[in-house]
Image (cartoon, grey):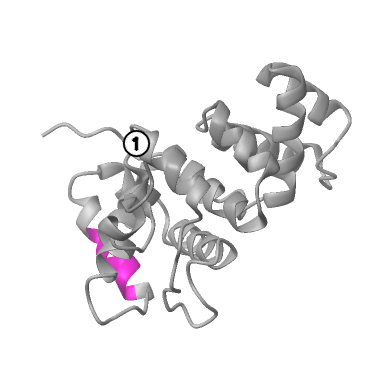
Amino acid sequence: MKTDKYIMSFTAGGLFLQESLMVAALYSERQDWAEVRKKVIENNLLQARTQASLQRICREVCSRLKTLNEAELHLFITGTTQEQKYLLWVAFCRRFRFIRDFAVEVLHEKVFTLHRQITQEDYNAFLNSKAEWHKELDRIKPATHRKLRQVLFRMLREVDLLDAENVLKDVVLPPRLRGLIARSPHDDFLVFPVAYSHVTEGAQ
């Protein structure tokens, strides 16, 4: 059975909410990702401490935002803080299929159990199950795996899907976001720890 390789380059940081808002607004004006990236790097608009960090963060932010369509980008720029966070989570999951699979197979499934705690063991068990089919995971050093897990858990807290004790929060998707997700071909409802029938109700 052939599977596409996982992209595991999400050690660059966390949510990057403010950076993403700035880059999205710039793209809304110019409609050219290459021009946006050039301006961001030439003027250090992300205020990174080093050129290498600036390029890495800019590349990561742009790659996530590119997964959003025009309507989603508009809501991201104009929406509430919670809508913005949820859209960045959607973009993060679209960008990294490993994260999407974790969201669907671990977070979403937790909704249907009485155990809402997300533990390191949950992550490790998921990782081990995927390593059977994705040999690229075996080539990652243990220290990098720990960093990846740390980034993922931090992201989940920044998006407000997990609390400080790594317990899943009650999530209610805003109506405007539900409408956009309902029209998307990606089935993004599944990346949120909510019951599918609940989020689709009234989304049309």
x and y percentages locating residue 160 in the rendered image: 54, 67
Camera-side residue of 42 and 107: 107
1 lies left or right of 171: left
Query: Looking at the image, which residue is at 38% across and 34% down?
Result: 183
Q: In the image, what residue type sits under mark 1?
A: His
Quarter that holds the C terminus: top left
Tell me the crowding category of disc 1: few under 14, some 14 to 19, or many 20 or more residues within 10 angstroms, Cα based: few
123 lies left or right of 13: left
145 w.r.t. 72: above or below: below
x and y percentages locating residue 140 in the rendered image: 40, 50
Query: Looking at the image, which residue is at 66% across and 21% down?
Result: 33
34 w.r.t. 48: above or below: above
* SS for dot 1: loop
Numbered range of the magenta stretch? 121-128
Task: Examine the image and state in which quarter residue 171 appears.
Answer: bottom left
65 lies left or right of 172: right
Quarter that holds the N terminus: top left
Camera-side residue of 12 and 102: 102
Magenta span: helix, strand or loop, mainly?
Answer: helix
Residue placed under numbered mark 1 in the picture: 186
